[in-house]
Amino acid sequence: MFSEYIPTISSYREQTGRKIFAFTCDCLPFEVIAAFNATPLKIPFTCAQTDQHTTAFSTTDIPAPLPYDLVVYHENCPVRPSIHDIQNIPTYCCGTFHGYGEDASIELHELLGTLLRENDLGDIELLQNESLQNAASPIDAVRKLVRGICGLRRDKPDLLSNKDLFTVLDAAVCFPPELVQNKLQILLDAMNNEPSRCQDTHIPVLINGWSFLDFSLLDDIEDEGLIIIEDDICGGRRQFDLSFNLASGYLYYEILNSFSYKPLCPSIRPSKERYDLLYTLLRNHGIYTVLFLPGPDDNIRSHRLSFSEKNSCGPELILLLPIQIIFFMWPENMRVIHYSKNAFAHITRRYRHYQPCTQ
């Protein structure tokens, strides 16, 4: 689909008459924006390139014209879009909400109201529950399909590579839901019907790597006995962490409350909140290992290392650097291992003898 991304979105925009709001990340609930005759989409990382991932159309060789009416980015996002400089597409800087629960929901309400008002989409106070239900339904259907695919991939990792999985995740938010829903359903049905030859002996891990784009490396990691069942990567599974009752008469408030508990990006959430919302829950999913994969320009390493201040019953942390691996295990000291596939095998062997803390 990405090979036809520009003409597909252009045609959709022309046929529906809806405005296309392109986001660098899921910093606001798309369901609410979709209820105001706009289609919120994420700017693709994967753009019709078989062996390469690009960062938010940041180069000057972008096909023109891009079918966007507005580009929305968060005020703290390290990936600032250059689309405006290239094609004179309007941009909008979105602010931050703090914490979670009722107070955060109020701040989210104000952020959404400002976005809608300043871009002539309407008044958030006039939002009708039925309109929101109609807008949220296809987005929620896609979200459930993606979670089903990720769940099957956990049990049948040989059916879908990590590189292909992240392309699926990208497509689910970069295209209008009505254009991808059937394709995702076909993939889910095929994975359900296809038997797996993979033995359930792999070590479950979560991958953390916000500027990490070489997803083929994740397959190399799994070749050495690990299985990536969750991730904390921009453009990964965390985009689909939202649950609500679509039939609720108070759907708007449910969406705001649920969204306020999303871990989101380190540029939006402070590390303490992200730790509480995501990392403290990993043991509930049988995960005791976290692999950190910072990129060469990663500027949030301190956010990751701050997790080391937690007690020894947290998940183990392994920091994978571009040229070396720091093997960090609470409460032991760091060990440095040269970066190679043998290092992944070393980690696997080491963890065969590891007894995680279960208190």
Image (cartoon, rainbow, N blue to C red):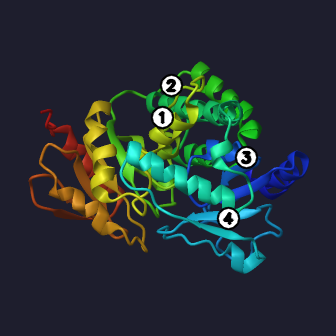
Q: Nearer the viewer, mark 3 or mark 4?
A: 3
Residue 103 in percent (x, y) is at 39, 48
- Given residues 37 and 62, the one toward you in this image is 37
Q: Secondary structure beneath disc 2?
A: loop
Q: Which residue is mark 4?
A: 71
Q: How many marks?
A: 4
Q: Which residue is mark 2?
A: 196
Q: CA distance from mark 3 to mark 4?
A: 16 Å
Q: Is residue 248 left or right of residue 337?
A: right
Which mark sits nearer the N-terminus, 3 or 4?
3
Q: CA distance from mark 4 to mark 1?
A: 35 Å
- The residue at the point 72 percent across, 63 percent down is 70
Which mark sits nearer the N-terminus, 3 or 2?
3
Q: Residues within 10 Å of mark 2 (few under 14, many from 20)?
A: some
Residue 199, relative to residue 207: is it above or below?
above
Q: Residues within 10 Å of mark 4 (few under 14, many from 20)?
A: many
Q: Are marks 2 and 1 in contact (CB under 8 Å)?
A: yes
Q: Hey, what amino acid is under mark 1?
A: Pro
Q: CA distance from mark 3 to mark 1?
A: 39 Å
Q: Which residue is mark 3?
A: 36
Q: Is residue 338 left or right of residue 74?
A: left
Q: Which residue is mark 1?
A: 157
Residue 69, relative to residue 183: is it above or below?
below
Q: Hey, what amino acid is under mark 4?
A: Val
Q: Residues within 10 Å of mark 3 (few under 14, many from 20)?
A: many
Q: Nearer the viewer, mark 2 or mark 4?
A: 4
- The residue at the point 70 percent across, 28 percent down is 186
Q: Are marks 4 and 1 in contact (CB under 8 Å)?
A: no
